[in-house]
Image: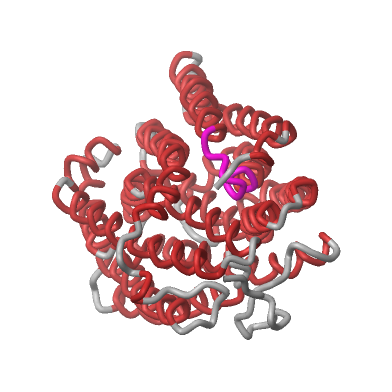
Amino acid sequence: MSFNPLARRPGLSGRALDITHGRLRDNIWQLSWPLMISQGLFFIPGLYDAYWLGRLGASALAAATLAMSLRIVMISVLMALSGASGAVIARYVGGREREQANLAATQAVLLFVLAAGGLGILGLAFTQGLLGLAGAAGDLLAPTLAYARVIFAGLIAMELVPSMGGMLNASGSPQLSLRMNVLVLCSLLALEPLLIWLGWGVTGAALALVLSNAIGMVYGLHLLASGQAAVRIGLRHARPDGDMIKRILRIAGPGVVQRGLPNLANSVLMRFIAGYGAAPLAVYSLFSRVSALLLVPCSGLSSAAPAMVGQNLGAGQPARAARAGKRIAAVAVVIATFLMGLLAAFAGSALALFTGDPETIAGGVQAVQVLALSRVLLTLGTVMDAALTGAGDTVSPMVIAAFSLWGVMLPAVWLLSTQLGWDASGIWWGIVIGSGLQALLLTARFRQGLWQRLPI
C-alpha cells in the first residue's frame, strides 16, 4: 500500500515534511529548527541538573557524572537500536511504504522496552561492582550509588523518550518530538528543586529526572499511537515480526559496538580524570553540559542528517542525499567553531555560574580552552556518523570508532597524562587527538559514497 505522508505542510500540527523534493537549504531548515529547539530542551535538563547538584557540592556533581557515565556504557545497545530503527523508518517513509513504516515503529518500541527493562534490572543487581569499575570510591561511592540506583530503576522511561524522539525525527515529524521534550523539561523544572528542597539530595535529583521522563514517555506513546505522526504504533503490529526484527537488528548489530566503544572509552576516560580528584571531574562534567547546550544548533543539524540521507535514499536520490550530508556538516562546523570560540574566551565566567569552588574554576579555564577544540572536531564527526547511520552504514563507523578511540585517543591520554607528566592537561589533549582523527576518517568514508548502494 502506498501513502503520502506529506498531507500538510509542517508547523506544530504534527504532519510530516517532504524532504525528498525542493531546495535542500529549505528542507534542512524545515527539518532542523524543531530539532534544534528539541535538542535544546533535551540538554537543558542536564544543565539544570548540574546547577542543583553544584549547589550540593563538587562531590555530588562528580557522583552524578560517574553514575551517568556507567549508564551511557550500558545503554549502547539502546542507542544502536534507536539509530537502526530510525534508518529503517526513514527508508520506508521515503519510499511511501506506510504499513512497513508502522510495523517498524511498533517493533522498535517493543525492542526498546525489552532491552531497557533488562538493562535496568542488570544495573540494579550489580550497581556497586559496576560503579567500582567506573572509578567510584571513597567519599564518592555513597552518593554515586544513590544516584545510579534511581536511574537504573527508571531506565525504561529515561531511554524510551529519546528513542521515540528519534523515530519521530526519522519519519519527518520533529515537531512532535519537540512537544514531548517540552513536557519533560517543564516537569523537571518543577520537580528537581522541590525534591532537593525536601532534603532528598542526590537521590531527589535522580528521581526528578526519572519522573519527568516517565511523563514524557506516556505522552510520546500517545503521539505515536494516536496517528499524529507519519508513523503509527498499534496492537495489530504488536505481534513479534521476525523479518522486521531481523532487519532492525542487522543494522543495530554493528551499531552496538559502534556506540559501545565510545561509551566504554568515555567510562575509561572518567577513571583517568577521577584519578586527579573531584575538581577535574567536575570541570569535565560542567564543560560537557555547557558545551552541549551551546551546540544545540549543531545537534539539531546532526539529528536532521539521518532523515535527510535515509529518506532521499528511499526516494531513489542518492546524489541529493550526499549533498544534504555535506551541507549539514559544513554549516554545523562553522557554528561550532564560533560558539566554542566564545566559550573558550569566557571560560572562567562560565564555570563561575555553576560553582564557587576556586580550585575547580582555576583548573577549569585551561581545560575548557583545550576541550573547546575537541568539540568542534566532534561536531564534524557526529554529523558524518549520523549521515552514515541514516544510510544504514553502521559497520564503517564502528571500525573507525574502535581505531580512533581505543587505538589512538586512550593511548594518547595515558601517554600524555602519566608518562609525559602533563597530568589532567594530557587528558584534554588526548581527547583532541582522538576526536580529530575520528572526524577525519568518518568524513573520508562519507565522501567515498559506498553507503549510497547499501540495502535496508
Camera sees residue 147: no
Q: Magenta segment, which residues? A: 387-395
Q: Position of residue 434 (x, y in %)?
A: 57, 29
**Does residue 430 show up magenta in the picture?**
no
**Residue closest to the far left:** 125
* Residue 45 showing in the rendered view: yes
The one of 124 and 336 positioned closer to us in this rendering: 124
Write the residue at 61% across / 45% down: 382
* Residue displayed at 73% across by 51% down: 332
Furthest residue toward right: 23
Percent position (x, y) of residue 115? 29, 54
Vertical placement of residue 42 versus 422, above or below: below
Q: Quadrant of the N terminus?
A: bottom right
Q: Position of residue 364 (x, y in %)?
A: 54, 43
In the figure, residue 281 lies in which quadrant? Answer: top left
Q: Is residue 441 above or below residue 65?
A: above
Determine whether, in the image, residue 150 is placed left or right of residue 28. Answer: left
